[in-house]
Image: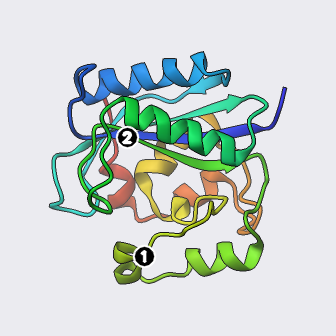
């Protein structure tokens, strides 16, 4: 059946499908239709735009899926779905009609622990201007983001980060309470 994959979904602009929440629901169906078996879907959450002031607030969710696609194949599929839903990659961290992020592909570390650690350690200023040219797994920012960890707690609270050694629930609890409280169920 393949490894369990964790995927974050977000949108803060309407698409041809409809509102951000409607777009996320349609994207989940598109992933499922592509051959990935959607195992669990988190609640949908209203979250402040990140970085603050960059656009309207987001709707965020996470899913757990399973299938035979490699991490690279799944990432390519996710980029195609984003494109199909009107996503234009014009500005890093800009507003978007759909954002799909591969958070984890089982316990895979890609390309290796040193590269993952390097990207995880970037300063906020570097994160704003630098993007990796290769797939980094687990997602190097997931442990810092309430808009990822709060929904992920719905579907995979016991998933353990293969390098940090902490579960999703532990990573979420380590975030400032204010950040967690800003992520509100719809």
Name the residue carrying label 1: 130
The one nearer the camera, 39 or 175, is 39
| Residue drawn 67% across the image and 48% down it | 72
The one nearer the camera, 84 or 137, is 84
Which-is-in-front pick, marks 1 and 2?
1
Whether 70 is drawn above or below 48: the answer is above
Name the residue carrying label 2: 10
- Quadrant the N terminus occupies: top right
Quadrant housing residue 127:
bottom left
Whether 44 is drawn above or below 134: the answer is above
Secondary structure category for the residue under label 1: loop
Whether 144 is drawn above or below 45: the answer is below
The one nearer the camera, 42 or 115, is 115
* Image label count: 2
Q: Judge from the rendering whether residue 33 lies leftward or rightward of residue 81; answer left or right.
A: right
- Quadrant the C terminus occupies: top left
| Residue drawn 33% across the image and 25% down it | 23
Percent across and percent down for residue 114 are 73, 80
Circles 1 and 2: CB atoms closer than 8 Å: no
**Residue at mark 1 to residue at mark 2: CA–CA distance:** 21 Å
Which mark identifies residue 30? none
Whether 96 is drawn above or below 174: the answer is above
Quadrant housing residue 39:
top right
């Amino acid at each position: 059946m393949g490894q369990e994959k964790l995927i974050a979904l977000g949108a803060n602009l309407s698409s041809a499908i409809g509102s951000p929440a409607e777009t996320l629901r349609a994207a989940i169906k598109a992933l499922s239709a592509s051959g990935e078996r959607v195992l669990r879907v988190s609640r949908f959450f209203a979250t402040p735009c990140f970085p603050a002031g960059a656009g309207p607030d987001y709707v965020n969710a996470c899913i757990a899926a399973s299938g035979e696609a490699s991490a690279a194949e799944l990432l390519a599929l996710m980029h195609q779905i984003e494109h199909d839903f009107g996503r234009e990659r014009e500005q890093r961290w800009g507003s978007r009609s759909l954002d799909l992020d591969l958070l984890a592909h089982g316990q895979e570390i890609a390309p290796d622990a040193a590269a993952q650690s390097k990207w995880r350690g970037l300063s906020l200023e570097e994160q704003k201007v630098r993007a990796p040219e290769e797939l980094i797994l687990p997602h190097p920012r997931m442990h810092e983001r309430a808009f990822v960890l709060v929904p992920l707690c719905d579907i995979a609270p016991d998933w353990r980060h293969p390098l940090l050694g902490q579960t999703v629930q532990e990573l979420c609890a380590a975030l400032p309470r204010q950040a967690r409280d800003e992520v509100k169920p719809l």
